[in-house]
Image (tube, rainbow, N blue to C red):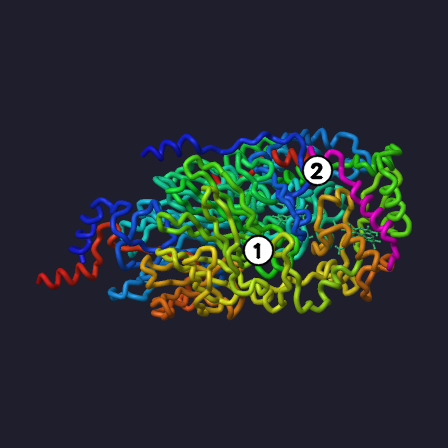
Amino acid sequence: MRIFWVLLFSSSISTAEPVGDVRLAPGDFKGGYDKLDYETDSLSLPARTGIDADLIGNIKSEHLGLPSFSAYQQEAPDASAIALGRKLFFDRRLSRNKTMSCAMCHIPEQGFTSNELKRPIGVEGRNLKRNAPTLLNVVFNRRLFWDARESNLAQQVWSPLLAKNEMNNPSVGHVLEQLHSDEEYFDMFMNTFGETANIMNVGQALAQYQQSLIGGGSRFDQWYFGREKTALNTLEQKGFAVFMGKGACQSCHNIGDSYALFTDHQLHNTGVGFEESMRKDPKSITVQLAPGIQASVDQSLIRSVGEEKENDLGLYEVSLNPMDRWTYRTPSLRNIAVTAPYMHNGEFSSLDEVIQFYNSGGAPNELLSPLIRPLNLTNHEHLALKEFLKSLTSNNLPELVLDGFAAPVGDVL
Amino acid sequence: MFKVKSFLIKLAILPLLAFGIGASADETCMSPYMAKIVGQEDFVYVWTLGKEGLGDEQDKLVTIDVNPASPDYGQVVHTLSVGGRNEAHHSGFSDDRRFLWAGGLDTNKIFIFDVHSDPARPKLHKTVDDFVAKSGGVVGPHTFYALAGRMMITGLSNNKDHGGRTAMVEYSNQGNYIATHWHPTDQDLRGAEKTGKYADGYGYDVRVLPRRNAMFTSSFTGWTNFMMDFGTMLSDGEAMKRFGNTAVMWDLHTRKPKKVFDMPGAPLEIRCAWKPNNNYCFTSTALTSQIWLMYEDAGGEWQAQAVGDIGDPSKIPLPVDISITSDDNGLWVQTFMDGKTRYFDISDPFAPKQVYEKVIGSQVNMISQSWDGKRAYFTSSLLDNWDKKGDQDEQFFKAYTWDGEELNLEFAVDFKAEKLGSAHQMRFGAYGLYGLKRPYEVKSLVADAR
């Protein structure tokens, strides 16, 4: 009996101070994990508290380096719809078995993508074949998905909501009925749209939240568009020169006169997809077992416990035109420092690997874009280019991430 | 039949056997707070994962009669489907052993089964489905470990990033939430000493040594990894960085973490010694294949040390479940990849020696042994998406006797052929525990009287 009382009074949830700043990386940082001298720098989850942002204000404010929002907007911004969309976005009950929300794959502090694996997994751990793109500045994408198969955000939501390997809902009606039967949602839909949840307004609400996730004002923007001479250091400026010149990155990742989206909105074959489909499996791979401890593992062992990765042919899967095999949309490079791993399949875990890939001329194949060729970058140019790419992080990103932290996570009550 | 039933009901209201009465118990890795079984176990409850495309496709509690004296010996006598594939994993009895709590690592549901009313036919007593919301975001209820009047539940993940940072969650025996105890992280060590380089905040198993006021936890990985296809994960360099490398020693009474130990490579099951002067617990690291010892040194300080390898670590045998014998002299270790069980002589806990091994199947995970060590049961499944694929995915329950030299197969249940699913964790049941007589013994008594 005595023990009982001691327990009753001594146990409580730990209350760490909320952090003012925010780390734009996974909370359990694994940098240098391949080295024996790796040290953890792990954040406390109870301390992961947020601050609501004024998302309407964010849309309306000036973002150095971004085009005018209204030229791209998909829904007329509305505070109540944004709040509803945000609640939906973080609600894990929106999946068949109530474990997956949009935010479990598009994680705020991980650049609204998943940094912790190449390709996210969905309901019951099912594999996805592609890397999750960031949702930062997603409104400026003319087409959606790596193969550009979708045209707007409101429609897009039904792909993950219904996909068996994402949120696995059995039908549109099932999702809507869940929302009807929840009092809070019922009221929010009535107040926002003057009607109950339907196939259109669920998408509109989610689109409202996602299109508010915009940000420019990176150090590059301050230097290039704001003409602040010291916003970029000389190495980063050198990297910009490589980006524009010897690297010819800007031929696809466009920079305009008054704004820069770092994309031409086109699809290209860089060879990443070709390589993935056509290369022969290596006999063994190196697996990281613990910090600084690796082992070479036979492919036969991997196969005994692994399923085949689904093939990926890019735009061809939409067009069925053989010329489109392994072509993918040019992604924006804004916030690239926080959205690893890279490419449609998450193949590269670092910017170094990406630059090395381009420097060596991509992965040659009959459909390789003529713009991809060996670059002969010096080590210094490689380093400069990397430093430049790291200067593209939006200055308001901490606010958007903290707002994500403040959003209620929907779980079964 | 009627007579037998009314007899059982009368006996059921007799007081339960209290802790300490009777010298033997069932599994050797149960909570010291728990009422014990005397003698032969009657049933093994197998917490079974539903498999897409097999039988009714959902998780179930499978009851197998394991008493050689029973007419149903070796048979599945009952199954109880709970709905959904929840990633059925571990289970544990309440301290009074009347209820079995079984968790779903994926859906976070906790199924509380009544195993005392009729040990042959467990009933679903209560389902807890708000574990994540109540606990403040803990995902993946793993170990269910009885403390006095309490259930300590370890988590594996969280609802923010589905990574490995997590907490232990304390419930009352009635199934009500009491408290969340977060694992120490660099940002908030919660008063613990970081003895090495790591304080990852990950969790997995929990065990206690009440006489030393000590509680121990180990660390595995978050939802993203334990739900992922195993081969896909091994091929994903980012994912492979997301494993726990720590064990934590806690103050049992205050639930405060005291020391974080470095233990590279995902330390899983913890098994503490039973003898009053053996102040140590074993664990094994899944990825680095080592046996570790946490022990109290001469100065009364707790230390952690790697004391031996399991198989050839470079081949990644993947040690999973371990089980200590009641005399603290032996440790069974299963290695999933080669389907072997290995017996280590641990009479010197600092120098375990493997003295026996046997292939149990194409894959093997859990073991449950009787207190006297004469019977050992094995099951096959590790995690739904980690189990081997195709023909290699044997799913079984196998009952062996152990004579100290050799494991002898008594019977096996093929969980695929029986359309049951993937066999995971086992817990023992017995009539005697609740003052009940075995029905077939009662019947023969009645027959004798006639």
Q: Residue furthest front?
A: B298
The numbered mark at residue A213 is 2
Q: Nearer the viewer, residue B185 or B117?
A: B185
**Which residue type does callout 1 highlight?**
Met
Q: Quadrant of the N terminus of chain A?
A: top left
Q: Residue at x 73, y 67 (%)?
A: A278
Q: Chain of mark 2?
A: A
Q: Is residue A164 left or right of residue A9?
A: right
The chain letter under disc 1 is: B
User: Can you tell which of label 2 and label 1 is closer to the viewer?
Assistant: 1
The magenta span reads: A374-399
Q: Position of residue B345 (x, y in %)?
A: 42, 61
Residue that lies at the very extreme toward the left in this rendered image: B450
Q: Nearer the viewer, residue A309 or A382?
A: A382
Query: Residue B408, position in %: x, y?
Result: 36, 70
Q: Position of residue A100 (x, y in %)?
A: 56, 46
* Residue denoted by label 1: B228
**B372 relative position to B285: left or right:** left
Asked if the residue at tag 1 contacts the one at tag 2, i.e. Cβ–Cβ closer than 8 Å, the answer is: no
Give the residue drawn at x 35%, y 69%: B411
Discs 2 and 1 carry the same chain letter: no
Q: For the residue labelled by badge 1, is the local secondary structure a helix, a strand or a loop?
A: loop
**Spatial CA span between label 2 and label 1:** 29 Å
Determine if the magenta segment contains residue A387. yes
Q: Residue lying farthest right?
A: A245
